[in-house]
Structure formats: C-alpha cells, structure tokens
C-alpha cells in the first residue's frame, strides 16, 4: 500500500507492505530461502522543477525506509534494516544551474541467512522510490558497480550542474529528440563496512561529465 499526499508546494508518500520473497536454492543444501518481511517507507519533497530544468532546482527531499524479517512470518531467521537520506538543491548563479547535496546512511542486523547487505560503487543512480534491495545508496562514481559491500553504508554526493545548450530539436519523424546538454561536476565520498567505521577507509571520487537529454 502506497499512499501519496500531494500539495502544490510539497509531497508526502507513505508505504506499508508485507513482501514475500523466495530465492530458489539459496537456503543451504539446495533448499529454497523464504524471506517474508514487513516494509515501511516515507518520502518527502518540496523540491521544484520547471520547464527548462535539468534537475530539481530548489528545496529539500527526505527518504526513510525500514524492513523487518521475522520468524513469526515464516522466515528462517530474524533481521532488521534501516536507511535514511536527505537531499538539498540550491540555485547556483546562472538560470537553472544547481548545487545538489545528498547524504545517506543504511544499517542492518540479524541472522546472516536473511540479513540485508548494502552495495557501494558505480554511476547508476536510478532506482525505485522505495528500494529495499542492496543498492539504494550505491552512487560512488569512478568505481565498479557494487565494488564494495557491507552491513552498514554511508554516502555523500555533491554535484554542480550547469546548462550548456538547449536544442529542442528532432530529425524528421524519427523518435529521436535532443532537448539539452549540460555539464556536471561531482564529488563523492562513501564507505561500506561490517564491524567498525574507519575514516581511513572512506572512498572518494571527483570528476565531470557532459550528458545530453
């Protein structure tokens, strides 16, 4: 059950779910692993997007999730997992230029057989609104996708996005349309670990890109 509450200036989405997951041959000695879980989530945003925006431009976002695996639901063990993240968007000089900051963390505990692990690494940031998989906080550009894993994860992403050109053109009747080109400078820092957080093990990356949409 996902219930959105939308207003002109802000949006809330609440999620409550009972998810039943079955993994063939993942339970040891070839047995199936059944992993029923109670899942909860909350998302808030008052960030703005306009007709010529290249991303969200002003405002805040927040997202919290919780997952509980219990033997009483039919699981072979007990586990809990929590994630939280917050993002902010500020105008940065020229029209539609944006300074975007995102910070998040996740933690899991419980029996190893059903405990959740987190992945860190890779450039892919697209995901479902409420992601209860391994990668809701994986965006660490310059590293392979899922290169680091752990029961705990912490991540910070800082981006400066600047529009370069607006084309708004296609070619004849082909389903191809070029809207804008923009530049992006980024700085990422993150760490995935199991036992103890060590500042010396934090991974960082910086770079730029020039995508077109």
Image (tube, helix red, strand yellow):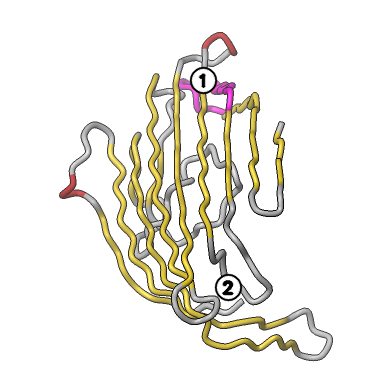
Give the crowd class for mark 2: few <14, some 14-19, many >=20 residues within 10 Å. many
At 54% across and 23% down in the image, what residue appears? Answer: 33
In the image, residue 116 lies in the stretch drawn in magenta: no
Q: CA distance from mark 1 to mark 2?
A: 39 Å
Give the crowd class for mark 1: few <14, some 14-19, many >=20 residues within 10 Å. many
Q: Position of residue 19 (x, y in %)?
A: 63, 27
Quadrant containing the N terminus is top right
Residue at the disc numbered 1: 69
Q: Position of residue 31 (x, y in %)?
A: 53, 20
Residue at the disc numbered 2: 54
Identify whether 119 is placed above or below 125. above
CB under 8 Å between callouts 1 and 2?
no
In the image, residue 25 lies in the stretch drawn in magenta: yes
N-terminal of the pair, mark 1 or mark 2, is 2
Identify whether 135 is placed above or below 211. above
At 74% across and 87% down in the image, what residue appears? Answer: 170
Q: Which residues are magenta?
A: 24-39
């Amino acid at each position: 059950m996902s219930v959105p509450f939308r207003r002109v200036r802000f949006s809330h989405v609440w999620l409550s779910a009972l998810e039943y997951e079955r993994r063939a041959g993942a339970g040891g000695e070839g047995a199936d692993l059944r992993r029923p879980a109670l899942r909860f989530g909350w998302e808030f945003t008052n960030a703005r997007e306009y007709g010529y925006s290249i991303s969200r431009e002003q405002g805040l976002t927040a997202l919290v999730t919780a997952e509980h695996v219990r033997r009483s639901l039919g699981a072979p063990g007990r586990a809990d997992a929590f994630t939280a993240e917050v993002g902010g968007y500020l105008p940065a000089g020229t029209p539609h230029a944006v300074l975007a900051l995102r910070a998040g963390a996740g933690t899991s505990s419980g029996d190893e057989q059903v405990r959740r692990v987190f992945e860190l690494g890779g450039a892919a940031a697209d995901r479902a609104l409420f992601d209860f998989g391994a990668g809701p906080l994986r965006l660490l550009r310059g590293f392979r996708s899922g290169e680091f894993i752990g029961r705990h994860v912490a991540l910070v992403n800082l981006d400066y996005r600047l529009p370069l050109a607006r084309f708004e053109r296609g070619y004849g009747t082909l389903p191809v349309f070029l809207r804008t080109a923009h530049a992006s400078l980024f700085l990422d820092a993150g760490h995935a670990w199991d036992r103890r957080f060590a500042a010396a093990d934090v991974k960082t990356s910086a770079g730029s890109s020039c995508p077109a949409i």
